[in-house]
């Protein structure tokens, strides 16, 4: 059974005013347990609105959101439990930091869950390690940290609740390439350790291609497609038509194919491209 | 949701009311308030109501929005009504129990007060609904400009007002975002007991203040980078020009005011 499911999910902002705007329009999809899903779409396509439904921050205007097959809005009083099961990290999450020490800020979520001190401590230390924050940082004030470190503190704050589904809204926005790679690296490692379901919203095809099992593409409030990474990038042309870029390397290989050098596979990452090319060169030399 | 707060919100449109010169609109609103408070009989209020609803119709803004603007002040209205009801000792006693005494005059005044305040809110909402905040402060600056002679910092005041107005939606949006982020971490903000809610308020206020200060800093730098140096010798992008319709609107308002004054003398 799918861990998360939406049925004809629709959400309209400012219903009944001149500012009315449908940001998510009849979206139905199923996300399976343990998957790593990349969420793409041009700006304003409704990605952030969609993911805020998964943990009940927004209530659908119409349609349903199911967690483990149960409608999350069936019992309004249990919505907080949903938020512990589905962790959501907002865009620029460092702006939500407020405690005096990094430790306390990471512990905020687990504390709200009503866990005991020992368990909170274990979780804070474990997630700090997962996200690459060293022990001595834990007692520092979060406001003295660098932007990238702050971002990681904020992500750890949600990870520490050990949600079954972790959703990150553009976790790498505004970071330099090194900071970006580090965060993605740590998220990937967290995924490997916990095998939890992860959704990452990202504008960078290169990033998404390198980690996602599946890709969800939003376009103009509608679900454009939701499929395995290979199959989505195979539709490179359609995707560029809705204003998104396929990874550069995919375009290079598309052009190569066009010119008669067919590798028979879709290529999205530079590493994979290198392997393919080396193999091809090896074949030539062998001949 | 916080975003649903409508008081002071601008509703873009192109109706005749939208197009009136904002300076005239402010003067008209002041006359309107005088009109509501001169009359002390229901007939005067009825004239005021006709004026209000006429203007609302002309503005083509759904009537619903005006009731929405009254809603946040509902409790205040009820308290005012209750005080009038309980402490009015004049008139015939309708109901007496221990120290509580309700008179017909008390009922009368509270109903009168409530209608008057509702009209007042609706009318002033019409001003803010049909005039963008920036235009509004522009007009205030113009109207107050004679005070500059007595060294009153008119421009600075207007600038502060427009900055404050400009940042209200931003801050509301920001509060909303921070609230959602903390709710995602299980903070109980609109549920839970009073003490947990109060405690969780800190988790919203701290980030909000930090971001407000950051914004203020950024804005100051940005203004300085563009060589802002106060009002001296500044020209404006949009000049305010009055048209015949402005004088007509003013004329109609004065007519209504005169009618109310005459009626209040008669009854
Ligand atoms: N609080 C709000 N009130 C009104 N409209 C909103 C609100 N939030 C978003 N919208 C509108 O809904 C649409 C979808 O917004 P959303 O934030 O979900 O897009 P997004 O795909 O996350 O974009 P981005 O890539 O820029 O983050 C946009 O057109 C936006 O203007
Ligand atoms: Mg977004």
Image (cartoon, grey):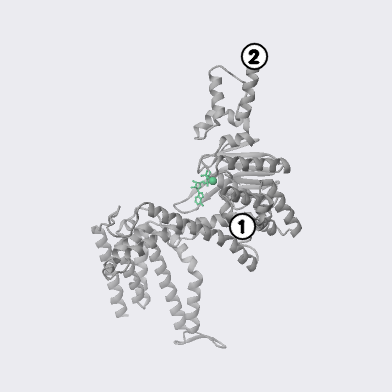
Query: Percent from the top left, x then y, of residue B59?
Result: 36, 58
User: In the shown orientation, is residue B14 left or right of residue A144?
Assistant: left
Q: Secondary structure at mark 2?
A: helix
Chain of the residue that carries numbered disc 2 in the rendered image? A
State the residue at coordinates (67%, 44%). Answer: A4
Decide which of B111, A279 is in the foreground and name it.
A279
Mark seen at residue B223: none
Query: Percent from the top left, x then y, of residue A225?
Result: 58, 35
Decide which of A117, B85 is in the foreground and name it.
A117
State the residue at coordinates (55%, 42%). Answer: A176
Location of the N terminus of chain B (image quadrant): bottom right
Residue on which disc 2 sits: A285
Location of the C terminus of chain B (image quadrant): bottom left
Residue on which disc 1 sits: A141
Chain of the residue that carries numbered disc 1 in the rendered image? A
Q: Secondary structure at mark 1?
A: loop
Decide which of A259, A138 is in the foreground and name it.
A138
């Amino acid at each position: 059974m799918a861990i998360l499911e939406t049925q004809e999910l629709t959400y309209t902002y400012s219903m009944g005013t001149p500012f009315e705007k449908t940001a998510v329009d009849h979206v139905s999809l199923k996300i399976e347990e343990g998957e790593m899903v990349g969420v793409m779409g041009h700006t304003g396509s409704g990605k952030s609105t969609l993911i805020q439904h998964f943990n009940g921050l927004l209530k659908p205007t119409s349609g349903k959101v199911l967690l483990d097959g149960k409608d999350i809005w069936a019992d309004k009083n249990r919505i907080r439990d949903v938020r512990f099961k589905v962790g959501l990290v907002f865009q620029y999450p460092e702006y939500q930091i407020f405690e005096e020490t990094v430790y306390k800020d990471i512990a905020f979520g687990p504390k709200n869950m009503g866990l005991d001190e020992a368990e909170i401590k274990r979780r804070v230390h474990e997630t700090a390690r997962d996200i690459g924050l060293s022990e001595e940082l834990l007692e520092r004030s979060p406001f003295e940290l660098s932007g990238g470190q702050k971002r990681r503190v904020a992500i750890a704050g949600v990870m520490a609740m050990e949600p079954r589904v972790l959703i990150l809204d553009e976790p790498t926005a505004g970071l330099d390439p090194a900071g970006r790679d580090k965060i993605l690296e740590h998220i990937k490692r967290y995924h490997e350790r916990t095998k939890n379901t992860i959704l990452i919203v990202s504008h960078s095809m290169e990033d998404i291609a390198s980690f996602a099992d599946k890709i969800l593409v939003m376009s103009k409030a509608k679900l454009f497609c939701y499929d395995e990474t290979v199959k989505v990038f195979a539709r490179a042309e359609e995707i560029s038509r809705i204003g998104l870029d396929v990874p550069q390397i995919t375009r290079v290989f598309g052009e190569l194919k066009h010119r008669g050098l067919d590798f028979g596979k879709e290529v999205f990452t530079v590493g994979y491209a290198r392997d393919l090319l080396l193999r091809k060169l090896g074949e030539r030399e062998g001949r | 949701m916080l975003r649903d707060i409508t008081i002071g919100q601008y509703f873009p449109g192109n109706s005749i009311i939208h197009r009136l010169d904002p300076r005239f609109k402010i003067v008209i609103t002041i006359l309107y308030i005088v009109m509501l408070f001169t009359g002390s009989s229901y007939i005067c209020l009825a004239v005021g109501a006709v004026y209000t609803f006429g203007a609302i119709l002309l503005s083509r803004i759904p009537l619903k929005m005006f009731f929405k603007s009254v809603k946040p002040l509902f409790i205040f209205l009820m308290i005012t009504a209750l005080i009038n009801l309980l402490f009015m000792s004049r008139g015939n006693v309708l109901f007496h129990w221990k120290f509580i005494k309700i008179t017909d005059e008390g009922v009368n005044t509270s109903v009168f007060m409530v209608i008057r305040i509702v009209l007042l809110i609706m009318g002033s909402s019409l001003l803010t609904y049909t005039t963008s905040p920036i235009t509004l402060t522009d007009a205030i600056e113009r109207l107050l400009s004679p005070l500059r002679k007595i060294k009153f910092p008119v421009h600075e005041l207007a600038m502060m007002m427009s900055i404050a107005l400009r940042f209200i939606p931003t801050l509301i949006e920001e509060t909303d975002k921070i609230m959602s982020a903390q709710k995602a971490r299980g903070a109980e903000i609109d549920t839970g007991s009073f003490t947990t809610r109060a405690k969780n308020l800190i988790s919203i206020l701290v980030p909000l203040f930090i971001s407000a200060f950051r914004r203020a800093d950024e804005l100051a730098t940005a203004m300085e980078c563009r060589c802002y140096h106060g009002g001296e010798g500044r020209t404006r992008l949009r000049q305010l020009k009055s048209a015949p319709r402005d004088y007509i609107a003013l004329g109609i308002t004065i007519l209504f005011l005169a009618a109310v004054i005459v009626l209040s003398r008669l009854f």
